[in-house]
Image (cartoon, rainbow, N blue to C red):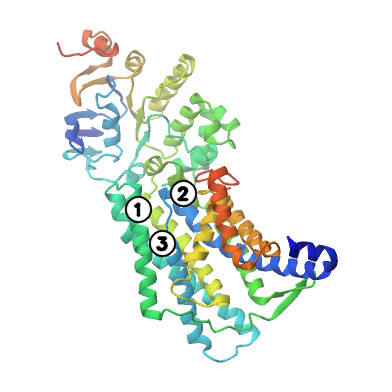
Amino acid sequence: MMLDVQEATVRYGAITALHGISFQINEGEIVTLLGANGAGKTTTLRMLSGLHAPSSGAIFFEGADITNVKAHDFSAMGISHVPEGRRIFPQMTVEENLEMGAFKRSSAYHDDMSRMYETFPILKDRRKQLGANLSGGEQQMLAIARALMAQPRLLLLDEPSMGLAPMIVETIFRIIADIRKQGTTVFVVEQNAAQALRLADRGYVMENGRIVFSDTAQNLLHDERVRAVYLGESVES
Amino acid sequence: MGAFGHYLSGHFATFRLEFWSLFVGGVANGFLYGMIAVGYTLVYGVLRLINFAHSEIFMSGGFAGYFVMKALIGNSVPSGAATVFLIIVGIVVGGTAGALVATLLERVAYRPLRRRNAPKLAYLISAIGASYFLFNLAGKEFGRYSISMPQPYINHPVFHIFGAAVQLYYVVIFIAGVVMLFALDRVVATTKLGRSIRAVAQDAETASLMGVNIDRTIALTFIVGGALGGAAGFLFGLGTGVVYTMGFVPALKAFTAAVLGGIGNLRGAMIGGLLLGVVESLSVVFVQAAYIDVIAFGILVAVLLFRPTGILGERLGRAA
């Protein structure tokens, strides 16, 4: 087991965003987290990057307790996070954004940079342009490439398809599949449930800060309740 | 206008001489403003707050420089070579004192508020409180009167520009200003520290996802800005003397310069500093010298009214 979340609770002041959730991710998997807006998906990812420490419960990564590790120590540990809305550094060039991804690496990383430019040729063309001047699709590719520059073993993706044209979404999902083939485990939060389930091995479904059920992606794809979630309706009857 | 017309009509040579000596003095002041202004703009970049206690960082550099000069020179008259050495020592000591006070301010006046997610107004009140505390402490400890600094050969004219003498004091400020501002510009544009400062300025949370330690970056930003402010304090004190209230007006003018250039924009602060120094100095051609501060703060009001983003606009966290 690569990641093991046990009974994790996250609170924002008086509001409880996550009510003791538990889930696991195995090495080499693509796991997706589904749920309606406000179900707690983003909070779950933020918890897995140290942006919100759980008030109770525990998180283990590759056997080590990482419950109270600070956000800035996650990338060196092997967990990279592609945040919701991509969050490209707007006043840095594409190249500088990639360098930020390798911030904690002490060894030379220029081979990786060339590799990113091979995977994402458009980024090579835009190398000297500011992040703010990229299109949404280009920013998403840059956000993924930037996260990969840290050589993560677990990649967290928050809504990678948000606001992108269908053709670009196809490309992004193909890239995510390739990333897994190259040995990186992927945990992806998506609104686009159908697409996410075709990509993933397993899925968890969240509602109101709780994981309500989980199954293989195949089974979830044909599950009545998932169809309800996908349509944004309530699962509880 | 009368005086200006007078110059134009009959005494062009006199006007030219006066113009260039005012210009030289203005550029020197401008470098000092620039060195202080970058401190405001750097801290604004990473914290989105104006460090109104920056004036006391400047003052601490002045006093630290004064004490070290007094210890090293006393009443003796050093040689030219020794003067260069002494000034370098003064800059280093002033800069160190500035960096220390800046670190103290960040730890005591700002970090606890950041931990509690305090509203911006709390930072402002904390800054003003820290400022009053520091300058009154200096007033109590060092006396409430102006002390002139032991001056090595600084009034010695080094060369002339269009007939106007350029004293060693100005040459020192030019060299120190150019070296420090250029070095700062390069550090922010090209080094890992600079990248982390820009990343925190643009998006602190995402910077932390990349592995940037936000607390440490903020602390280092205060150190860098404090070092330049403290060094400027020494250079200012060398010419004007030191007193517990010495930081107030120069720092407020440097704040004006930072706003003029575009707060958050590093090169803007440098350009704004030079521009303010020169404009303010040359204004005495047109108005009485007593109006200098009116001109400087008039510029602040005008910028805030008509172009609040400053000359270069707000390009947060941008190197250039």
User: Residues at badges 1 and 2 in contact (C-beta under 8 Å)?
Assistant: no
In three-dimensional space, the C-alpha distance between marks 3 and 2, rounded to whole angstroms, equals 16 Å
Name the chain letter of the residue that bears numbered label 3: B
| Of labels 3 and 2, the one closer to you | 3
Seen in the picture, residue B198 relative to A80 is either above or below; the reply is: below
Seen in the picture, residue B242 relative to B107 is either above or below; the reply is: below
| Of labels 1 and 2, the one closer to you | 1
Element at label 3: loop
Residue B105, picture quadrant:
bottom left
Disc sitting over residue B45 in the figure: 2
Element at label 1: helix
* Extreme-front residue of the structure: B2
Residue type at tag 3: Ala
Q: Earlier in the sequence, mark 3 or mark 2?
A: 2
Judging by the rendered image, the residue that carries numbered circle 3 is: B53
Judging by the rendered image, the residue that carries numbered circle 1 is: B123
